[in-house]
Image: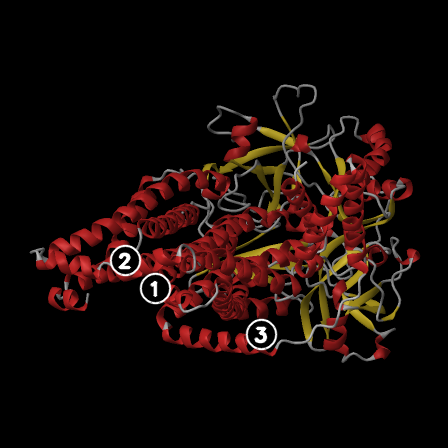
Amino acid sequence: MSKARASRIYRALLLCAPPRLRRHYQPDMEALFADRFAEARARGVFAIGALWMAAVWDVAQAAAREPFRPRPPRVPDERQALMFGTDLRYTFRWLGRQKLSTSLVVAMLALGIASNVVVFSLVNGLFLRPFPFPEPERLVYINETAPKWNLEIVGINYPDFDQWRRAITLFDGIALYDENNFNFSDEHGAERISGAKVTWDFAQVLGVQPIIGRLFRPEEDRPKAEPVTIIGEGLWKERFGGSPDVLGKTLKLNGRPHTIVGVVPASAEWPGNVRLWTPLAGDPAQTFQSYGLEGIGRLKKGVSATDGEKDLLRTQQPIWDARDKQHIVSPFAHPLHEQFSRNYRDQASTLEYAAAILLIVACANVASVMLARALARKREMGIRLAVGASRTRLARQLFLENLVVAAVGGSIGLGLGSAALKLLLRAAGDQVPPWARFGLDWRVIAFSLVVTIVTTFLFGWAPALHAIRGNLRGVMHAAAASTTASPGGRRTLSILVAAEFALATVLLVCGGLLFRAYDRIAHVDPGFRPDHVLTFMIALPEATYPDDAKGLVFWDRLTTKFGALPGVEAAGLVSCPPLGCHWGTFYDIEGRAPLAPGQSNPVTLYRPATPGYFKAMGIRLKHGRFFDDGDGPKRRAIIVNQTFVRTFWPGVADPVGRRIRGNGKDSPWMTVVGMVEDIKHYGLEKPMIPGVYVPLSQGPSATMTVAVRTTGEPDGFVATARAAVRDLDPDLPLFRIRTMEDALRRSLAQRALYSWLLGLFALMALVLALGGTYGVTSYLVSQRTREIGIRVALGARMPDIVRTVLGRSLTVVGVGVALGIAASIGAARVLGDLLFGVPPHDLRILSTTIAVLLAMAALANLLPARRAARVDPMRTLRTE
């Protein structure tokens, strides 16, 4: 081995040594090794081998000792601090001189970040914030489902729950609840107060402890037990001033005094604004099926919701064997938070995508402005490099500029997002689920910080590096020879502008489709006349009206009194008004073929009603007649809707005279006396199911909805209605007071909210895209001043210059819009059911979007184009 080759190998070996050792001693070590290698080669091959082994050992020892070697304390470098202060002052001076471009970047960042803060705050409140209970991940929602009845959620039957409670093994506990309202009366009058009936262990399952007093006991959760109640912290402070002597006092609920035994914290007012609780007092020996309750469970540690559901299905087997051999009804268990938030997932996903697209548009705008600034600063950076500035120093300077812009834009965006969220929640009103909590927390702040950093450094730092990249001689030559931007720079700017318009197109098309869908739904015929109709509910307490006979007397007196009031065109009662609730049952159809194995009757919507209800609601009769005063238990009449006839008597036009009966051979037959048009009972965008009306005397209910058609504005009739009911019974409050027009608006409020939000994001994206194309065109025009001056000097006219500038800009915009149209058709397909039958390729929306984008882009580019056409060739050439 030659001496030169040995030296190269030894130099490569030293790369494994600590950097400190190489920095201080590498030349000496190489010289020493060369001398020893010459001596070893004279002694023979064994000496050379020993030398290499010693060299490797020395390097390995040094590398092993380096991590444990004490390091001297670092002395602050005053020059570094001075240079940082200088860079910071220069940053503020530079940004101050570039007020327009700096303000543009900050504004774009703020808009993009604010929109994402709003959407993430909604997502955080709906999906990420846990419920305020100990170990909320162990809580599950329990209910029963019946696919054969086309019912995803049936409600829980109390005997089923009793069987589960005795046989489960994977739960620490399960409980039932039934959100309810109570007639609350005292010396100040009567009102309706929100509450819930719960099993005695409901609070223990949630993990709630009382502030004062105690929770329910098992013996209090039985039929005919002494009535007791637990009140919430809000009611405690409002009614009793937070006094600890509230225990033992009574509240008159539904006409019966209830003793207060405890007060629970505000966190227990779940899932809505529940203000008090009473025992459910269910009877496991009941013979009828009382589906309608809801349940919660607390899993044992380490048990999943899936395993908990299997445990419930195992305990359901005796019920199937005894009374449900077809397995029609089955229990299920879902994570509690997931169950309550699932109805918002489609809308939240749509807004997430829209906010992300808007942020990308803002990022592209930031990148284009920063790139234009970087290209314009090549001359400055070239001069600074020429006079001795290092590229590291320049990179640090650009880093500071981006950091300042990011801090200002992120702070403004966070503030704007917080303010916009408050306005949005105020506008949403009762569409906001009561269990959700929105606002700034550590997740929102961390999200905005990450978005700010990623946005600024990913889309601002990379373009800024253009200013210090490349060969010094090339930079100076390009800067001195011409002010025209390089082809690569122009190409990058064009790509960014095209991307902005493509993404803005996607948002505008999707927003337009959602607005078209909303408009279509808003114009769907509800099947009744909602104008001039006021509805409210009244609940008769069992203590005052213990049987159906007394209840029917009161309802008859009420309809008679309301029918005689001035300003009333018609008045009636119904158990379940449109957009209000659901009562389901099953019927046997006379003459219908027997059901096939595994087949079951569909659920039928059941509504007791008085004769005046149909006129009050403006429901249209198709065949037969409405109810009259003679219809009752002796003359068993029934009215069906169109869907009922299509389902059970396909091909029959007039079903009057046909008979049906309740599910059971002992049920009496009822004769169809009329068929009415379908109404949109479950919402304007939901299909109707088979439905029937029966006279109130055939199915009396303690809770009814009063429908009043007025000659004047229905809102002005509320005081008259209160006074009329007070004359009949001063302890009965009116609740759920609303006009049917307001009910229809509320049913569309959630759709309107996210449609408007998406439209707002689309408008913001359009504004950002227009700002981007204006800025880029202005920059390119300023860089082409010399070229345009020469063209004008050679005879080019103003229209020619304008046409040239606009042609190039609109070509880029046109490419972006074309790509956006193709992408938007695919994106619209993802919206699925939200479009309510509006096709993703709706020509009206697509053509309008193209026209708006191109027209706005032409306007945005017209000003810099006209400025270019007014260039003075003599001044330009003299300056050049």
Q: Secondary structure at mark 3?
A: helix
For the residue pair 177 and 423, the one nearer the viewer reads as 423
Residue at mark 3: 80
Mark 3 residue crowding within 10 angstroms, few (<14) / some (14–19) / many (20+): few
* Crowding at mark 2 (Cα within 10 Å: few <14, some 14-19, many 20+): many
Lower position in the chain sequence, tag 1 or tag 2: 1
- Per the image, label 2 sits on a secondary structure element best described as helix
Find the distance from the CA under tag 1 to the CA under tag 2. 16 Å
Above or below — where is 133 with respect to 321? below
Say which mark, if any, is on residue 780: 2
Residue most extreme to the left: 795
- Which amino acid type is shown beneath numbered disc 3? Gln
At a point 82% along the width and 62% down the height, the residue shown is: 208
In front of the other: 606 or 300: 300
Mark 1 belongs to which amino acid? Arg
Spot occupied by residue 842 in the image (x, y as percentages of width and height):
35, 39
Closer-to-camera residue (654/209): 209
The three-letter code of the residue at mark 2 reads: Leu
For the N terminus, the quadrant is: top right
- In this rendering, is residue 726 above or below 680? below
**Percent coordinates x, y for residue 698 in the rendering:** 66, 43
Quick one: label 2 or label 3, which is nearer the N terminus? Answer: 3
